[in-house]
Amino acid sequence: MKFFAPLLLIAVPVLAKTEQVAEDLSRCSNDVAPYTVNEPLLPDPFLFTKGGRARNEREWRCRRREISSLVTQLELGVKPEGNYNATLAVHVFDFGEKHDQSISFNAKIRYPTTGKAPYPAIIALGGTSLPELPGVATILFPNDEIAQQYGAKSRGIGKFYDLYGKDATAGAMMAWAWGVSRLIDALEDTPAAKIDLDRIGLTGCSRNGKGAFVAGAFDDRIVLTIPQEAGTGGGGCWRIADAIYSTGGNVQTASELVQENVWVGKVFENFTSAVTTLPFDHHSLAALMAPRGLFVIENDIDWLAPASTLGCMKAASKVWDAMWESDSFGYSMMGLHNHCSFPDSQKADLTAFVDKFLHRKRVDTSGMFFSSANSTAGFTFKEEDWIKWSVPEFRLVD
């Protein structure tokens, strides 16, 4: 019999840093200052800001930090860190310099009817459109409570902003990413929750799929991210979406997105008419998840700009290729079904990724389908027109 167990979190502003600074990162240069480029194609994700390319996983960690810094400064806003203690009733404490205001939210856990504790789990932003995953717990994350997304007037509203102020740079998606990380912090300190901390996944659909994409990129403890039908602002690239729009396509662009809602930071408004000046695109954001599991689910709906997502994720997959981890990346696009419904035709691929990353089974997830050209709304994506950089073969390092 299924049942729900509430997980209560209480949080206040943060001062101390988490103790997760890897030794390799100490060798990296400091976070880069924001800058712009003149690049109409998809930027090289391996290229350091000061020249040279990442050639192994150690160097990639430095390049990854550069990408993370640029994305937070120019698009998503800053994700605060956390330092937490917890009990079964999960009391979470941070210590701020200015005030002691606190927040709380409930994340309900639905346990599976099969398997045994501790269970693998998938965190679902705002609910899930996926079919039931046998043996996997579902944790319902109330992202709208953390940061509202009810239109352009929602900016600065939600429990995240109660803590960090209405002028915090983080847009709603980065605020959700913060909340997901705080939830995982609490799970780490709550064995009674019966969740296996090494087998945590994350999903969401549509606007919540955009949020899942961002949250997965900014927390390494998430072993599998499954954004569903997120479109532009998720797995789609800003540059390709603009190109589709320029040919008459009815797609969501950066310019439309910032008018519709508050998912990104306000700073991104400076780039909505000049996305080619960004030193990154969402293939680079996706690459922050490499070599962890990423399974992108899309639908052939014009507004989602499926050609943009296909091209963007084809570019992103090359980072997994460089790491010899191609089978940790998957992309599936199926049409002829309603938005955020889940067709049976995608279930086998979903099951394979869940089995591999959440059940730790030996499953073949190689050869996920990519088309060399995909036409939608009169636009054809051709890899050779968008990707001019080569894929390095990472050398092994100790």
Image (cartoon, rainbow, N blue to C red):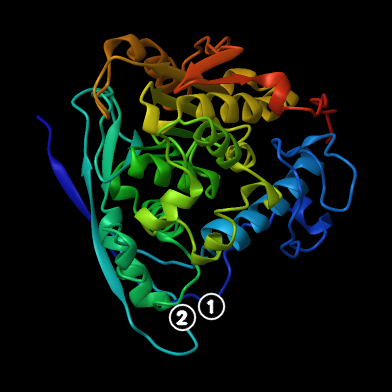
Q: Amino acid at mark 2?
A: Phe
Placement of the N terminus among the 4 image quadrants: top left
Numbered disc 1: secondary structure: loop
- The residue sitting at 31% across, 70% down in the picture is 157
Which residue is outermost to the bottom? 98
Residue at image mark 2: 95
Circle nearer the N terminus (2, 1): 1
Please state which of residues 246 and 241 is positioned toward the viewer in this rendering. Answer: 246
Placement of the C terminus among the 4 image quadrants: top right
Q: Is residue 198 left or right of residue 92?
A: right
Q: Position of residue 286 (x, y in %)?
A: 58, 38
Task: Give neighbour class at mark 2: few <14, some 14-19, many 20+ (Cα, 10 Å).
Answer: some
In contact (CB < 8 Å): disc 2 and disc 1 = yes
Residue at image mark 1: 15
- The residue sitting at 71% across, 35% down in the picture is 41
Q: Is residue 169 left or right of residue 183?
A: right
Q: Amino acid at mark 1?
A: Leu
- The residue sitting at 64% across, 40% down in the picture is 284
- The reply to whether residue 391 is visible in this rendering is yes
